[in-house]
Image (cartoon, rainbow, N blue to C red):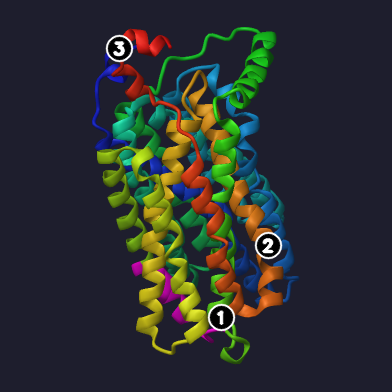
Amino acid sequence: MSERTSRKVSPVFWVPTLYTAEGLPFVIVNVVSVLMYKSFSLMLKSKGLPEIPDSQIALFTTLVAWPWMLKPLWGPFLEMFKTKKYFVVATQFFGGICFGLLALVLKLPTFFQWSLVLFAIIAFNFATHDMAADGVYINTLSQKDQSRYVGWQGAFYNVGKVLSQGAFVILAGYLETRIGVEEAWMVVMAMFGGLMILLSLYHVRMLPSGGAPGQVKTLRETLDTFWDVVKTFFEKKYVWWGISFLIFYRFAEGQGIKIFPLFMRAARDHGGLGLPLEEIGVLYGVFPPLAFITGSVLAGYYTAKRSLKKTLFTLCAFFNIPFVAYAFLAIAQPVSTFVIGVCVVIEYFGYGFGFVGMVLFVMQQIAPGKYKMAHYAFGSAIMALGFNISAMFSGYLSDYLGYRNFFIWVLAATIPSFLVTWFVPFKKTEGEMSNEPAGEQAT
């Protein structure tokens, strides 16, 4: 390993940029692409050409984002070759090239098909990037530093979100009226590509290696290692407790978060708040992200001082109790924008504070072992599964119960989260084991 890659660099210089690079592509593929295709659809309509139906936009922008859900399937292979830093830098650079190609195909008559192909490649590329980036974080930082910087991790992931669906979308809207829709989005996608390439060049120098490269040389070794990754995950001590924790911790969140925007938009005589879309954008777009970031950072330092085991129940309370704000809004149906905004900020602060508990649980209780990066990816997928399971039936419940009773139900749905948090057993962390006498470690 060269002196450059082995030298010690403070996490302050790479955690923010690394997780900004995670947030940007995810939101571009999942959110910004929808806005882009809608602009192209309106442009085609103005020229008397067939539009892109909303159904196709929604369907295909969802399908191309599947790699983020399926990434554990190839995550184990990243444990075998090169360093984690190698994959981070390579995927950032290659992703930048792909965004540049995306900018070019937007001028083609078949731009819709070719841009979807490139979005799918970008999604696969950056799903791989995310696993490697998390591998750098987990393998480089101590247990204490993982807790200290996890708030930074969440905060700068959200900076990526704000940049991509905020600043760059505003720029696209500004350019559309001046140079045209195609040219505006070509500029924006090219800028995304340029930014990712710049980040890759920065990380060549500033990013730690994230562990030694793998030594696998043959296909048989590759397949054996893949099976070993899967097998050792399910052989971990308390793994089924851990899976239950990750699923039930988000049982109420998946329902409440999914329905709340619909409740805000619904007419007051149907139990909603009857807010115009512009007002909802203001309520979500300024103070809630700041509240989320503040909660995440504070929770990171709070947990670092006391350990995850001692703080997890408190984090769970912060995560779930703010759903009282949703129930209050559904029951009282206030008309004051200030009151509604305060409730949203409270919920987002608690969400940011409590989400840290789940992330650290995966890092410290699920991921440690022979294949940290791959097992962290498994844990992340289970986190998403917990959210999606509860979100799947939330619409049916809301229609059946009405908004008022639904959000009261959401409060009751927090009970499994508290129970699994209270009873989940903890393995000793690497830091705790290193402080024990040799004889006790052996036992």
Residue 226 within the magenta-colored segment of the rendering: no
Q: Is residue 226 left or right of residue 351?
A: right
Does dot 1 land on a helix, a strand or a loop?
helix
**Alpha carbons under labels 2 and 3: distance apart:** 57 Å
Does dot 3 land on a helix, a strand or a loop?
loop
Q: Which residue is mark 1?
A: 265
Circle nearer the N terminus (2, 3): 2
Q: Which residue is mark 3?
A: 437
The answer to which quarter of the image holds residue 259 is bottom right
Name which residue type carries label 2: Ala
**Alpha carbons under labels 3 and 1: distance apart:** 60 Å
The residue drawn where x is 45% and y is 28% is 427
Q: Is residue 405 visible?
A: yes
**Alpha carbons under labels 2 and 1: distance apart:** 20 Å
**Residue 338 versus residue 210 in the image, above or below:** below
Q: What span is colored magenta in the figure? A: 272-287
Q: Position of residue 408 (x, y in %)?
A: 55, 73
- Foreground residue, 403 or 50? 403
